[in-house]
Image: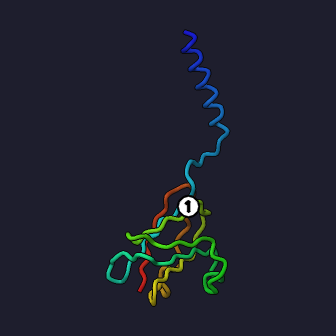
């Protein structure tokens, strides 16, 4: 019986500690897939995230940057749950003229977006 009581006591302590813990278990992340105008994924594309249009237009103060892998994907971690302006470039191709702003990210979720460059 003492083993059962110890287990119950440990469980009560655990639940008590968890009650004070923040509800968010995961950091807000954004997985960006980059495709060209034909729908092919693009490896080696540079991605920059901006929190406001002015910084996006002036290409300054990016809050995060990354480069796509061989599958055309990059995951940003530990982001704020806001709408971002996204700049994607590779060589002479970019996403200017459409798809620059994404909707507000869901807090504590794995968000996804596909950006087309041409």
Q: Quadrant of the C terminus?
A: bottom left
Residue placed under numbered mark 1 in the picture:
77
Of the pair 46 and 7, the residue shown nearer to us: 46
| Residue at 59% in and 60% down | 78
Kind of element beneath mark 1: loop
Q: State the image coordinates of residue 116 (x, y, percent, origin top left).
A: 41, 79
**Image position of 21 with respect to 67: above or below:** above
Q: State the image coordinates of residue 55 (x, y, percent, origin top left).
A: 65, 81
Q: State the image coordinates of residue 105 (x, y, percent, origin top left).
A: 55, 64
Q: Quadrant of residue 72?
A: bottom left
Q: Quadrant of the N terminus?
A: top right
In the visual, does 82 lie left or right of 116?
right
Q: Quadrant of residue 36?
A: bottom left
Q: Quadrant of residue 20?
A: top right
| Residue at 55% in and 14% down | 3
**Image position of 63 with respect to 118: above or below:** above
Q: State the image coordinates of residue 7 (x, y, percent, origin top left).
A: 56, 20
Query: What is the residue that sits farthest to the top in this orientation?
Result: 1
């Amino acid at each position: 019986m003492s083993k059962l009581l110890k287990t119950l006591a440990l469980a009560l302590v655990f639940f008590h500690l968890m009650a004070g813990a923040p509800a968010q278990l995961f950091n807000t992340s954004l997985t960006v897939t980059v495709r060209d105008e034909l729908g092919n994924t693009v490896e080696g594309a540079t991605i920059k995230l901006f929190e406001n249009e002015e910084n996006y237009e002036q290409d300054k103060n990016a809050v995060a940057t990354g480069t796509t892998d061989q599958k055309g994907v990059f995951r940003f971690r530990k982001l704020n749950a806001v709408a971002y302006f996204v700049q994607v470039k590779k060589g002479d191709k970019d996403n200017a003229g459409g798809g620059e702003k994404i909707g507000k990210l869901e807090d504590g979720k794995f968000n996804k977006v596909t950006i087309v460059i041409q």
